[in-house]
Amino acid sequence: MSDKDDLVLDVSGVTLQYKTPQYLVTATYRVNLEVHQSDRFVLLGPSGCGKSTLLKAIGGFMEPVEGTISLRGRPVTKPGPDRMMVFQEFEQLMPWKTVLGNVKFPMLASGRFKGRDAHERALAAIDKVRLTKFTDVYPHMLSGGMKMRVAIARAMAMEPDILLMDEPFAALDALTRRKMQDELLALWEQVRFTMLFVTHSIEEAIVIGSRIMLLSPHPGRVRAELNSPGPHGDEAEISHLSKHIHDLLFGHELSARRPAGVA
Amino acid sequence: MNTNTMKKDALKLRVRPEFERDLVDASTIGAAEIPLTPLQRLRNNTAFRRGAILVMMALIWQGYALWLNNPLLFPTFSDTVTVMVRDFINGELLGRVMTSMKVLIIGYVIGVALAAVLTTLAVASRLGSDVLATLTAMFNPLPAIALLPLALIWFGLGMWSLVFVLVHGVLWAIALNTNSGFRSVPETLRMSGRNYGLTGVRYVVLILIPAAFPSILTGLKIGWAFAWRTLIAAELVFGVSSRSGGLGWYIFEAREELNTSSVFAGLLTVIVIGLLVESVLFRAIEVRTVQKWGMQR
């Protein structure tokens, strides 16, 4: 497979602006990135670096004022089920549908899968996130971590070209977050989906990502793109990478006062 | 000096011994469930509690009417019920109820349909939203009954005048609630819906309506109450529509004949129908939807 064939997402020279009642905010400035097949691509940066806005633009929810976004060679113009989004908020689940209903909904609504096929795919996805016991339960009876697993199952069942995850674990407690990170990686080992993951935690970026893009704030510009050893890398390597990222993002003024690796 | 050292000693934390334990066996706790007594279960039953309140009120009514002993002003509960049952059996009251219900349902359905169209337009565009906001601000405070003279000029003495007034009574309350419900749908849920490629009417039907259902249900309830109120008032004011009058007309006629227990029977019928719709129909919808989904307690 040549390099061009496994290019999934191509973002080139993208400048994003949005209006608040008072200001015109430039969220990102001429950002380039390439996500390849089965990448675990992480967008990392402090708040205000436009990483979530960039993800929304890739999702098709806003149009760049400059540059192009294309998915497998097709330009992105509107939201679509070829890019499934997983959000941070638990409200992304539909309270009026059961776990099964939620997972099936996008397949049926988009017409991508139908009838028995959709049903079986949904059950398989629910099984992958170990929620089979809760298939017929409504979301309000689930814990935060379980809701997030439903959202991930729902997105994965669609077999999108790319999974867009906007700080999906930020609303969870520390222990659950660790567990969810491990589970997400285990799922990736099985399915090898392509994902673009946004986070502001250096630690999470190193654990989740195979490649990490650092964005600087106000407006978001590319600072660096680094390879991560992933969760199985040795400790010295990881702590070195963590310190390196920290220095790149915050310079030296902060790193003197805080131990490396604390996000 | 001495007191100072004493203070310092008191501030020092006392070190307590650490310990680790094997867990106590907790498997027996399951047997500790105590079943509720029949009386407790009865008291937990909403229908029973509400029913008890109704019985109590009927008893107070009966007692007061007997004590007052003036059937022309205040007939007893039993007299009222007797007249009500009699008129239901001879078909008079039932016919009146049917006439009223027919007008009511036609008006209500048209009102709901118009509200659906207006709020969908309001969701689809900013112009639609401005139109709806302006219209509701203008017409919601306008009492429906105030439009009756105009309705009579436009539609004449007949059912359609009543329907016109009813639609006005229903439409704005439902549109206002539905619109505010739509606007409070979380942004994440909206984005999820659009992510699956949903647009237009499908987006409204599959995402917005269920997500805003608690508000919509409130709107439907308020609309129902407004409709019922407006209808009885309109019937009282201009009475007969074509040949057969409704429930309001029944009450009005009874007053003309100074037949107080019939007036009461008419009012009681209005109340009973209102109670049934509220606590049976709407309650059933609530239990099967917003409560099951955890959107409302």
Image (cartoon, coloured by chain):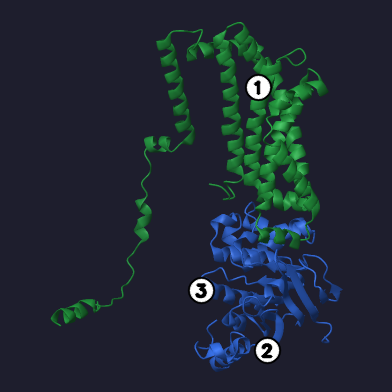
Chain colours: A blue, B green
The residue positioned 70% from the left and 26% from the top of the image is B146
The mark lying in front, picked from 1 and 2, is: 1
| Residue position for label 1 | B233
Chain bearing mark 2: A
- Is residue A195 toward the left or the right of residue A245 in the image? right
Q: Residues within 10 Å of mark 3 (few under 14, many from 20)?
A: few
Chain bearing mark 1: B
- Where is residue A54? Give x, y as percent: 73, 74
Q: Is residue A45 above or below residue B287?
A: below
- Where is residue B81? Give x, y as percent: 53, 14
Q: Is residue A159 at least partly visible in the picture?
A: no
Quadrant of residue A113 within the rendered picture: bottom right
Q: Which of B33 and A204 lies nearest the eye of the viewer?
A: A204
| Residue position for label 2 | A226
Marks 2 and 3: CB-CB under 8 Å? no
- Where is residue B16? Give x, y as percent: 24, 77
| Residue position for label 3 | A174
Q: Quadrant of the N terminus of chain A?
A: bottom right
**Mark 2 or mark 3, earlier in chain:** 3
Gap in angstroms between the C-alphas marked 3 and 1? 62 Å
